[in-house]
Image: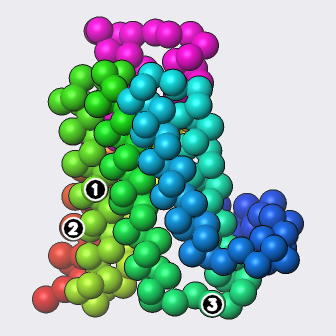
C-alpha cells in the first residue's frame, strides 16, 4: 500500500475541509454513506459508458472515503461500529466500480472478475488478520487508495488517448494489474498472518 503510507502527510490538506464539515455538523457516517452512493453512481456511469462522469464520481468516492476517518478522528468519535460500516462500504464500492467497468463492456468480463477476486481477497485477508488476533495488516503491493488513483489517472488517459495493446484497452490492463497485484497482496498477507499464529 504505497499511498496509504502518506495518509498522515495529507492531513494538512484535509484539515480545512474537516473543520468545515464539523461546523456543518456532518458526521463520519454521512461521508461513509456518501462514499457508497458515489461509488454506485460511478459504477452506473461506467456501465453506460459515460467515463468522464464516472471518473468524477470515483473522485467523490475517494474524497468522502478519506473524510469519514478524518472527521471521526477530529471529533474523537471513532468506534468499532463506524469502522465496521466503513469496511463494508469500501468492499461494496470496489464491487460497484469494477463491476461497472466490465459489465458496461469497457473490458472483457473475464478480466473484470479476475480483478474483483484479487481486490476482494486482498481486502479480506487484511481484516481477517485482526479477526485471528494478529491485528489489522495492510501490507502488500496495492491498496485501495492506489486503486482509486489508478482508476482516475488511467480513465483520464484512456479518454484523451484511447490505446490498446494486444486488443486490451488501458482500463483492461489496469484491471489485470488489480487482479495480479491483488492476489499477490493476498498471498503476502496470508503468509504474514500464518507466520504469526499457531
Tell me, yes or no, if residue 92 can be seen here: yes
Q: Residue 112, labelled with which disc?
A: none
Q: Is residue 187 left or right of residue 102?
A: left
Picture quadrant where residue 97 is located: top left
Residue assigned mark 2: 191
Q: Report the magenta residues as a range.
A: 153-179
Task: Answer whether labels 3 and 2 touch (C-beta < 8 Å).
Answer: no
Q: Residue 120, labelled with which disc?
A: 1
Q: Main secondary structure of the magenta part?
A: helix
Measure the alpha-carbon separation of dots 3 and 2.
34 Å
**Most foreground residue, 192 or 37:** 37
User: Dot 1, how many residues are within 10 Å of its Cα: few (below 14), some (14-19), or many (20+)?
Assistant: some
The mark nearer the N terminus, 3 or 1, is 3
Measure the alpha-carbon separation of dots 2 and 1.
17 Å
Q: Residue 84 location, x and y as percent? A: 40, 79
Quarter of the image with the C terminus in it: bottom left
Amino acid at each position: 500500500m504505497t499511498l496509504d503510507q502518506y495518509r498522515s502527510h495529507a492531513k494538512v490538506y484535509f484539515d480545512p475541509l474537516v473543520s468545515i464539515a464539523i461546523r456543518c455538523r456532518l458526521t463520519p457516517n454521512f461521508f461513509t454513506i456518501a462514499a457508497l452512493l458515489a461509488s454506485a453512481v460511478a459504477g452506473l456511469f461506467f456501465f453506460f459508458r459515460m467515463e468522464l462522469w464516472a471518473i468524477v464520481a470515483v473522485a467523490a468516492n475517494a474524497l468522502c472515503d478519506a473524510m469519514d476517518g478524518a472527521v471521526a478522528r477530529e471529533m474523537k468519535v471513532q468506534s468499532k461500529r463506524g469502522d465496521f460500516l466503513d469496511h463494508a462500504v469500501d468492499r461494496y464500492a470496489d464491487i460497484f466500480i469494477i463491476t461497472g467497468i466490465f459489465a458496461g463492456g469497457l473490458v472483457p468480463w473475464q478480466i473484470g472478475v479476475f480483478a474483483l477476486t484479487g481486490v476482494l481477497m486482498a481486502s479480506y485477508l487484511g481484516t481477517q488478520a485482526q479477526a485471528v488476533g494478529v491485528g489489522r495488516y495492510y501490507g502488500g503491493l496495492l491498496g485501495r487508495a492506489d486503486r482509486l488513483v489508478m482508476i482516475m489517472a488511467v480513465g483520464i488517459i484512456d479518454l484523451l488517448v484511447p490505446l490498446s495493446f494486444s486488443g486490451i484497452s488501458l482500463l483492461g490492463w489496469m484491471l489485470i494489474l488489480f487482479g495480479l497485484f491483488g492476489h499477490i497482496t493476498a498471498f503476502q498477507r496470508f503468509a504474514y498472518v500464518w507466520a504469526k499464529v499457531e
